[in-house]
Image (cartoon, rainbow, N blue to C red):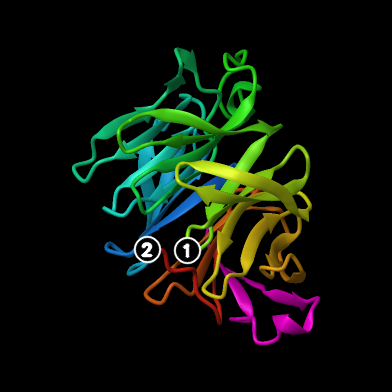
Amino acid sequence: MRMRAQFEALDDRFAGIGGDEWLEVLHTGSRKTEGPAYFPAGRYLVWSDIPNDRMLRWDETTGAVGVFRHATGNANGNTVDRQGRLLTCEQGARRVTRTEHDGTVTVLADSFQGKRLNSPNDIVEHSDGSIWFTDPRYGINDYYEGAPAESELGGDHVFRLDPSGSLSIVADDFERPNGLAFTADESELYIVDTRRRHLRRFRVVGGTLEGGEVFAEGWFDGIRFDHAGRLWCAAVDGLWCYDPDGTLLGKLRLPDSASNLVFGGARRNNLFITNSTGDLLSIRVTFAGAVYP
């Protein structure tokens, strides 16, 4: 199944940004899709169906879709680490895990200073081996995506998990931290605050963050950088594209709210998109995802 793609230019610098004239619907029928993660070695994509407590897998070579895992702890955000392993935010189980090459699951973090995490949401890996993730309380609000519980931390934070296993708070002034992404040179980290409806930019200084000025205003979820340093944000009407100077260059309009995105394919120019109505979409575009160290 296909739907018409609509690229909308809002700035002259958006010229040349585009792709196929259609979006391909790779899968539908889930409740709320999130966390797409592309595995280049296996040419497949894994993503979360949060309310159904499962993860799905799409095979690029055959187009087949199947269940990757049941009982996922209401998995939300995912990423692939530099060793080809799956890192997952299990918001219902209130932990961050890693799926090893043999399929076993290792718990990386589930508490901070003796207090349970809220509900880890989105996750990225730094080239030094550290793992950075957001921890809002969406998974402890109700039964739809987790189970009701009080926040033991008393706040919604951004965490850094050191390769040694030490966990630290790197930002504690968010209301609902959500999507996050490093720039290609890893000098900056961008983080969404969905409750405040804006996106902030931080400087990465070793294992800490500095700055935190607002980069853009809007309702955002997942975010990713492309090869030219442009930031693509999942938003209420599709994907918004920002220049590094903060200018909104244009949009890829969608019929439903986008929840997250990831670049994949042999040239990193297949854009995979999850949305609020339970679909997995794909479009071949004229640009590629950022290359990281």
Task: Please check the rendered image and state whether residue 8 is part of the magenta-colored stretch, yes or no.
Answer: yes
Q: Are marks 1 and 2 in contact (CB under 8 Å)?
A: yes
Is 249 left, or right, of 187 in this rendering? right
Element marked by disc 2:
loop
Q: Amino acid at mark 2?
A: Pro
- Quadrant that contains the N terminus: bottom right
Give above or below for 38 relative to 114: below
Disc 2 crowd rating (10 Å Cα; few below 14, some 14-19, many 20+) is: few
Task: Give whichever of 110, 274 is nearer the camera.
Answer: 110
Count of numbered labels shown in the rendering: 2
* Disc 1 residue type (three-letter): Asp
Residue at 47%, 29% in the rendered image: 168
Q: Nearer the viewer, residue 142 or 160?
A: 160
The location of residue 173, given as percent across then percent down, is: 68, 32
Choose the circle earlier in sequence order: 1 or 2.
1
Residue 238 rendering spot, x and y as whole percentages: 70, 61
Q: Residue at x 68, y 46 (%)?
A: 212
- Residue at position x 46%, y 37% in the image: 160
- Residue 274 visible to the viewer: no
289 part of magenta stretch: no
The magenta region covers 1-28
Numbered tag placed on residue 185 in the rendering: 1
User: Mark on residue 61?
Assistant: none
Residue 293's disc number? 2
Give the quadrant of residue 244.
bottom right
Q: Can you say which quadrant of the picture contains the C terminus?
A: bottom left
